[in-house]
Structures are given as structure tokens and as C-alpha cells.
Amino acid sequence: MAAGSFHEEEALGKAYDARLMKRLLAYLRPHRPIVTLAILLLLVGSVLQISFVKLTQLAIDDAIKNVQLSAEGRVDRLGLYALAFLGAVLLAFATRYAQTFITIWLGQKVLHDIRTQVIRHIQRLHVSYFDRNPVGRLLTRVTSDVNVLNELFSSGVVTIIGDVFSLALIIGAMLYFNWQLALITFAVVPLLAAVSFIFRLKVRNVYREVRGRVARLNAFLQEHITGIRVVQLFTREKQTFEQFDAINTDLRAAHFRSIYYYAVYFPVVEVIGTLAVALVLYFGGMRIQGGLLTFGQLVAFITLTEMFYRPIRDLSEKYNVLQASMASSERIFGLLDTQPAVEPPAERKEDGPFRGRISVEGLWFAYHDEDWVLRDVSFEVEPGQKVAIVGATGAGKSSLISLLYRFYDYQKGSIKFDGTDIRELPLARLRGHLGLVLQDVFLFSGDLAGNVRLRDTGISDEQVRRALDRVGFTRFLDRFPDGIHTEVRERGATLSTGQKQLLSFARALAFDPDVLILDEATSSVDTETEQLIQKALDELLRGRTSIVIAHRLSTIEKADKIIVLHHGRLRESGRHHELLARKGIYHKLYLMQYKNETVATSLETGAAGR
């Protein structure tokens, strides 16, 4: 796979981007009371941590070492300190529990909001966007990238605030207890900062490698699992596995490098912390001997010294969370900032009666720049007419249908429905008048009825059965024990090609469109199934505007008008017998197909004879 196919996943950007963080924090605004409560709980938890230290110091100096108290008095005071310590522990437990629950709940709420926004936006994007962006990449946006933000919101933003406050509180407590020992402890901070800087630099590079290799692995899996039939057909399992194993091994090596840096960094931090404790013990012991420090104060200070390094370690880990979140948020916002190429009209027109007259006038269209697919195409479809569009592969037939649906917008000319330009019609209204049956049928997992009604609760089971009956699917339905509620596997794996075509046709009929469009709808079915569809069409297309794209010219001989496209231009137009009489492009196409069909029939007859 070329590097360009996953380069976007490797771009990490800055570890902190104020612009991106501002947009991320906007998702917390609807939950401001919860965020405030979580921060307050963190602050209370930090204060309680300091209270443990103070209670320990008082218990040692006042209850254990106070020689002026009797043994009974020491026990009484020690019991009071123990009860106070127990109360602080229980309060800290409750605070920690509530804070953890709230922050995780908050993270899930924000993730739900982001996923909802991303999916809603993806559904608005134009078809050309999906032509340029692989499905695997879009799935990564909705799953992996959003999950990375979960860590930011559930254990990042709020926790970072808590760590900073805890660090400030610990530093203040250290200076309060003994500012000389505090300065001794701070003497090792530059060493810690240098180690942390090197660690962040190394981990940043490794993290980039891991993200790139994960993206490469995901893309490889998505492509080869989707194309598993080709892999098995050409017995490429061994080669495919070897390629996967190489990518997987590369990913494992990148993870190992990440583990190595973590395995080195945290022990080094512990060593630096131990060095600080050793310095405190040495100089603190000397001050105890000089009567300038109590034993309880020394114990409390050592505890504070150990606590001092916890938020520093946490902040180092949060650096990676922040860096990953900046990269993921940049990709997510890049998707959300992509504007649909096909925009709905600014003003909503009144929805009047739809008669079904289609006018195409001087239509020019290109997918890229001026590489024209359609050139100055003009024709009209009268209400109730059956119009066929034919032409060689690449003539622009399917592109024309895409323009009718406004999957793309044309550069010149116009398409009008009942005299109104389709760019002035809301997309839902425009597409609500059209029914499309494609050659490549897409079925969703679920049941037969669900694939006909597509979650439209206005279409009853009886209407589903009627639609299936009208296209001749009943003959297959009788074989399924669960009827219309028979399970359909992913992409219709349990159905034949002909059954999927009929189901797609029933889907279009169930929505009762004003204009029925058939794009190569009978090219993938056998002769018997095609006859079922043709029989249904003779009845169903009567009085309904229809546009038929077909390579098999025998299916459109009764069309009211046949339009012949050639290299993007409309070259001929008329009825079947008129076009044959002209002996032009249509006549050549017809003779070529007739000859091919005759040869195919002869081969089938000969095979049957043998």
C-alpha cells in the first residue's frame, strides 16, 4: 500500500492547539454543572490528601512522642487522630468514587454528542466525498478517533486541572512545613524536567509510528476481508497472510519501542524521587539533631515529597492523551468542516402537485475540472412516458441519473421537474418523487421487510407483501419459513443475485415513486427472473414516468423514446424502429448485441446437445 493512503493518520500536529481545544471544550458547555461538580470533587480530594499528611504529623508529634502525656492520654489522643484519619479516608473514598463516576459519565455523554454530530454530517456529504475517502478511514473517524477523545474528557481535561491544583497545593504545603527542605526537594526538579522532555520527544515519534501502522493494518484488513472471495478464488491466502504478518509484526515492533520508553521513564522518575527522599532524610535528620525539626514533620515532609511526583507522572501521561486528542480532533473537525458540494436551496418552495415532466437543457457535467462526461445534452420526458437511455460503457448514462438525484451538481445547463430547476427543490422532496433500482443492489442486515421499507413505519407489512407480489418475489417467499421476516445476512449473502434484484425493485415500488429509474436493473438476472420483472413492469409503468438504462436492448424495444448517448453527447433520439431505420449508432449497437446473443444461444444449444 502506498504511503499516501494512510499519511493522514500519521500526522500528529502540535501536542496542544488552543484552537482545537476551544472547539473541544465547547462540547462541555451543555454539561457545565457536571464539570464544575467534578472539579470541586477533585479539589476536595486534593485537600483531603494533604489532611492525611497533617494528621500523620500530629499523631506522631502530639500523641506518640509527647512525653508530657501519660500512657492513657497518649492512647486517647491517638484514638482521636485515628478516628479523624478514618473519617478523612471514608470521605476521600466517597469523593473519589463520585468524581470517577461523574467524569466517566461525562466522557460518554460527550462521545455520544460527537458521534451523533459526525454521523449526521456524513449523511449530508455529497457522493464525490465518498469517492475520494475510503470507508475504512470514515469508520476510523467515528470509532477510533472518537474513542481517543473519550480519554481526554473522562480522564484528561478535568484530571489535568486536578493534578495542577494538587501540585500547587503540595508545593504550598511543603513550603509551609519547611521551606529549606522544600528547596532541597526542588533541586532535583530540573533533572526530572530534562528526563520528561526526552521521554515526551521519544514517545511522540513512536506514537506517530504506531498510529501509522495501525492505519495501515486497518486499511489492509478492510480491503482484504471485503475482497475475500477474490483472495480465495485465486488461492492467495498464503501470500495475503504473509503480507498481513509483515504489517502486524511492524506494528508490534512499534509498540515494543513504546513499551521500552515507558519501562525506562517511570523507573527513572522513581529513582529521582528516591534521590529527593534521600536528600530530605539526610538534611532533615541533621535538623532533628539540631532541634529545628520534629520527627513528625520529617515523616510528613517525606510523604509530601512522594506525593509531589505523582501529579508530575500523571501530567507526563496526560501529555500523550493530549497529543493523541489533538490529532484525532483535527481529523474529526476536518471531516465536520467539509461542506457538502450539493447544498439545499436557501428558500423553500411550496410543494405543488407533481406531474412528472422532466426537462434537460444544455447539460454539461464533469467530475474533475473540464474533463466533460456529458456535453450539451438536451431532451424532455413527458409525464407517463417510458424513456430509455442507451450507449456504450462510459457514454455518461449513470452520470445522468446521478445528476437527476443531485448526487452531483452539473456545471452548465439545467434539469427541471415540472418547470422548476432541481437546484431550487429541497433534496428530500426531489428524491421523494424518484424511485431507483440499481444493478449493484445493496441490502442491509435484518429481514426482508426491513430491506423493503427501510425503517419507514408508514409502510405496513401488507404493503411490503403487495410490493413483493407485484414483482414476482412471492414464488421465492414461499420457500422461506419466516416469510417477509426472514433474516437477511450482511449485503444479502443468503439471497441469489436475481432475488436481490427483485427485492430492490419491490423496495422502489413500496415507496410508490412518481418517476421510476432503472439503472441496468435486469442485466444481472437470468432470463426467467427477467421475464418476471418485465411482466411486472408492463403493468406498473403504465401512467408512470420512467427512465430505463439498459445494455440489453431487447428490454427497451417498447419504450416511448430511446436516447442514444455517445462520448457524452446525445447523438440519436426516437423510437426503436425509427432508430433502426436510420442505421446509425443504435443500429450498430443492436446488431452487435444481436450477434452476441445469437452466438451465446448457439453455444447453449450445442452444450445442451452434448
Image (cartoon, rainbow, N blue to C red):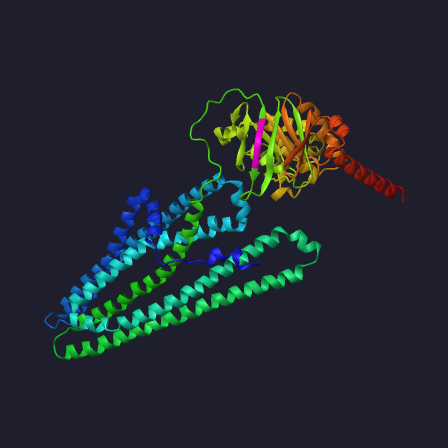
Q: Nearer the viewer, residue 266 or 207?
A: 207
Identify the residue at the far right of this view.
610
Left or right: where 608 falls relative to 53: right
* Residue 361: in magenta span: yes
Q: Main secondary structure of the magenta part?
A: strand
Identify the residue at the far left of this view.
68
Task: Name the residue at 53% across, 23% down.
Answer: 419
Camera sees residue 25: yes
Would you identify the image quadrant in which residue 471 lies?
A: top right
**What quarter of the picture does the N terminus occupy?**
bottom right
> x, y (%) of residue 176?
16, 66
Camera sees residue 75: no
> x, y (%) of residue 602?
85, 40
Above or below for 468 versus 592:
above
* Residue 319: in magenta span: no
Task: Name the residue at 42% across, 30% down.
Answer: 346
Q: Nearer the viewer, residue 238 or 128?
A: 128
> x, y (%) of residue 571?
67, 33
Above or below for 256 versus 561:
below
Task: Write down the region rendered in magenta.
Answer: 359-364
